Every structure is written in structure tokens, then in C-alpha cells.
Image: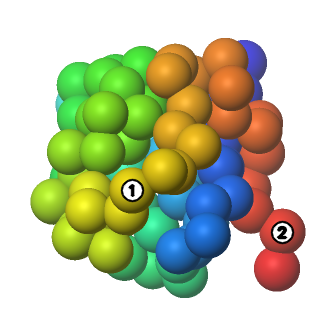
Amino acid sequence: MTTIWHYRTPVGVFWIRPQPNSDGRWWLGVGDEMPLGSYHSPEAAASDMGDQVTGWSDWDLLRGAQAPRDLSEWTPGPPPR
């Protein structure tokens, strides 16, 4: 099972990965190490990113963005360096 996903956007590469030392929580983040929020599932994180309600204005206020609607549109694995 994949435990890390990424999605490239014009403002940065988003990622979803397990939150260390938590009871099944997931991080949604962008860039090298900027977590944006903690979620109960990777699907919930992907949904907030797709709805542009991440709390990060560079993404949330971007108009005309091609936002994925669910986790199936994300690329499995860590972002390329």
C-alpha cells in the first residue's frame, strides 16, 4: 500500500504522508518540509487540497488551478528531488 503521494502545482509540490508519532494521522504539506495540516486520512487531506482550503493562501487563492478532486489523481511515492 502506498503511504506517500505527491501532486505538482504551479505554486509547489504538495505531499501527503503519515504523521510520525501519531495514531494514524496524515500530514498534508507543500515544498520541502512545510506541513499545512493534520488529517484523519490521506483522502481527507487530498479533498482539502482539491477544494483549495489548505490554509496556505498561495494555493487557496490561486484561480484557474487544476486541482485534483481525490487521492486517485495524485502520484504515488515521494516527490522527486
Crowding around mark 1 (Cα neighbors within 10 Å: few <14, some 14 to 19, many 20+) is few
The kind of residue on which mark 1 rests is: Arg
Q: Is residue 19 visible?
A: no
- The residue at the far left in this view is 55
Q: What residue do we see at 68% from left, 58% from top?
A: 8
Q: Which residue is mark 1?
A: 63
Viewer-closest of 8 and 75 = 8
Q: Which residue is mark 2?
A: 80
Q: What residue do we see at 42% from left, 20% from top?
A: 43
Q: Earlier in the sequence, mark 2 or mark 1?
A: 1
> Residue 74: percent from the left, percent from the top?
68, 34
> Residue 40: percent from the left, percent from the top?
23, 25
Residue 39 quadrant: top left
**Secondary element type, mark 1:** loop
Q: What residue do we see at 50% from left, 22% from top?
A: 69
Quarter occupied by the N terminus: top right
The kind of residue on which mark 2 rests is: Pro
Q: Which mark is residue 37?
A: none
Q: What residue do we see at 67% from left, 18% from top?
A: 72
> Residue 75: percent from the left, percent from the top?
77, 38
> Residue 60: percent from the left, percent from the top?
27, 57
- In the image, 6: left or right of 23? right
- In the image, 11: left or right of 5? left
Q: Using the numbered discs, state the Cα–Cα distance from disc 2 to disc 1 in whole angstroms.
A: 26 Å
Viewer-closest of 75 and 10 = 10
